[in-house]
Amino acid sequence: MTTYQPDLFSSVSWQSIQKPAEIAEYRLVSGILDGTFPVQSDLPAERELAKKLGITRPTLREVLQRLSRDGWLEIHQGKPTRVCDYWTEGRLGVLDVLADHLPQLPDNLITDLLKVRVAIAPSYTRAAVELAQTDVLQLLEPRNQLKPLPDSYTQFDWQLQHQLAILGGNPVFVMILNSFRELFFQLAPHYFSIINAQKHSMDYYHDLAEAAQVNDSNKAAQLTETIMLESLDYWKKIKLT
């Protein structure tokens, strides 16, 4: 009799199987982004659309409701489903969905997201130093053990910014960051592949620790604004090369 051997699968990396609803959502969003379903147009009738997507009508309704909540679609009982202008009518969930469609993203999306960080990061960093000085210093302690690898910097930088936002006490800032978490983890390694970007970030971590040590929240905010502007500049250089 064959018995289960726990070591047999210890090195196997399993990928979850996509559900029909997930596949259909991906195809619908791709169709919106590539113009198959133009903004302000009506989707095909439910029966036709379900057939095109290869799913049941109940599954289609589930997908449509989810995309409606994020602002991709507008549903009215007894009327065709309208494709929304997701840039003007979409909600934060749109950013999370876009992470799965990088090749179809407009060129200015990443710079726009970085500008959002420039706008909010100094504010939550100032508040974090004012409200939780000791916690900020603890967050920065592992910086000296950082490996000079893009993924290491990506993980550390996300953890730092996310926790600073939490410590800053404004949950809206945290939700804004969370909304483009997946985009960050896909794109930040490109930024941190630049040696100077790693160096400037490490200088920022050290300088931020010094500002937190003396409880200089204004200096912390200024340092954060500077590094965010630098990351924006570096990203523009990446896009030009």
Image: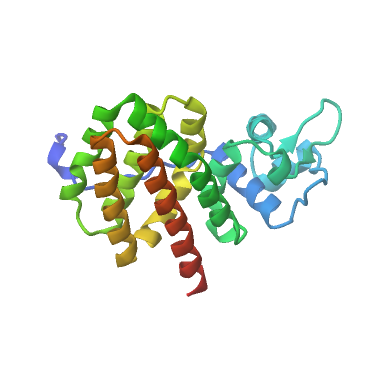
Task: Say if 105 sits above or below 240 in the image.
Answer: above
Tell me what residue is drawn at x 29 percent, y 44 percent. 208
Q: Nearer the viewer, residue 53 or 184?
A: 184
Question: 54 or 172: nearer the eye?
Answer: 172
Q: Judge whether 20 appears above or below 75 on screen.
A: below
Q: In the image shown, does 113 or 125 lie closer to the viewer?
A: 125
Please say whether residue 13 is visible from this viewpoint.
no
Q: Depth check: give the residue in front, 3 or 223.
A: 223
| Quadrant hosting residue 81 | top right
Q: Residue at x 50, y 65 (%)?
A: 236
User: Quick check: can you spot residue 192?
Assistant: yes
Please provide percent x and percent y for residue 11: 19, 47
Q: Position of residue 153 (x, y in %)?
A: 29, 52
Answer with left or right where residue 21 lies relative to residue 196: right
x%, y% of residue 12? Answer: 24, 47
Please state if 167 lies on the left or on the right of 107 as rendered.
Answer: left
Relative height, residue 179 to residue 152 (above, below): above
Q: Residue furthest bottom?
A: 241
Residue displayed at 54% across by 55% down: 110
State the colouring used for the structure image: rainbow
Number of numbered callouts drawn: 0
Q: Position of residue 15 (x, y in %)?
A: 37, 45
Quadrant location, the N terminus: top left
* Rendered image quadrant of residue 150: bottom left
- Residue positioned most to the right: 79
